[in-house]
Amino acid sequence: MTGWLTITRPGGGLFGASEGGVQLRVAEARLQAAAPEDRATALRQIEWVRRHLGEQIYDLHCPRGHRLFVTTPQIARAMTRAGGAWAALPGMG
């Protein structure tokens, strides 16, 4: 894949990708701040990021609080395999 991948937020701003190491530090900070009922999700996020450390990772989130961690290669695969106007993203939600 060449060039830049630009993902626009629902409100018009842009989502930016971060290196896996940066996302790992962010996920570890979320774990430290997590309420007891949210620790399992925070741990799953850390494990997912560790498996993708060498990739650009997007932390996509919507105004309703949903989050999806997805890598640039995962987005590219989903787009090239989509049979229509929409692509289903894998990742860690």
Image (spheres, rainbow, N blue to C red):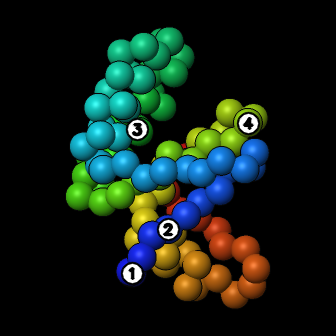
In the foreground, 44 or 29: 29
Three-letter code, disc 2: Leu
Three-letter code, disc 4: Pro
Q: Are marks 4 and 1 in contact (CB under 8 Å)?
A: no
Q: CA distance from mark 4 to mark 2?
A: 21 Å
Query: Which residue corresponds to mark 3?
Result: 44
Q: Residue sitting at 73 percent across and 74 percent down? A: 86
Q: Residues within 10 Å of mark 3 (few under 14, many from 20)?
A: some
Q: CA distance from mark 4 to mark 3?
A: 22 Å
Q: Quadrant of residue 46?
A: top left
Q: Is residue 70 left or right of residue 28?
A: right
Q: How far across and down, in percent of the image, does residue 70 sit?
A: 47, 56
Q: CA distance from mark 4 to mark 1?
A: 29 Å
Q: Quadrant of residue 44?
A: top left
Q: Are marks 1 and 2 in contact (CB under 8 Å)?
A: yes
Q: How far across and down, in percent of the image, does residue 56 sit?
A: 35, 58
Q: Are marks 3 and 2 in contact (CB under 8 Å)?
A: no
Three-letter code, disc 3: Arg
- Label of residue 1 in the image: 1
Q: CA distance from mark 1 to mark 2?
A: 9 Å
Query: Which residue corresponds to mark 4?
Result: 63
Q: CA distance from mark 3 to mark 2?
A: 26 Å
Q: CA distance from mark 3 to mark 1?
A: 28 Å
Query: Which residue corresponds to mark 2?
Result: 5
Quarter of the N terminus within the rendering:
bottom left
Indicate the secondary structure of the residue bearing disc 3: helix
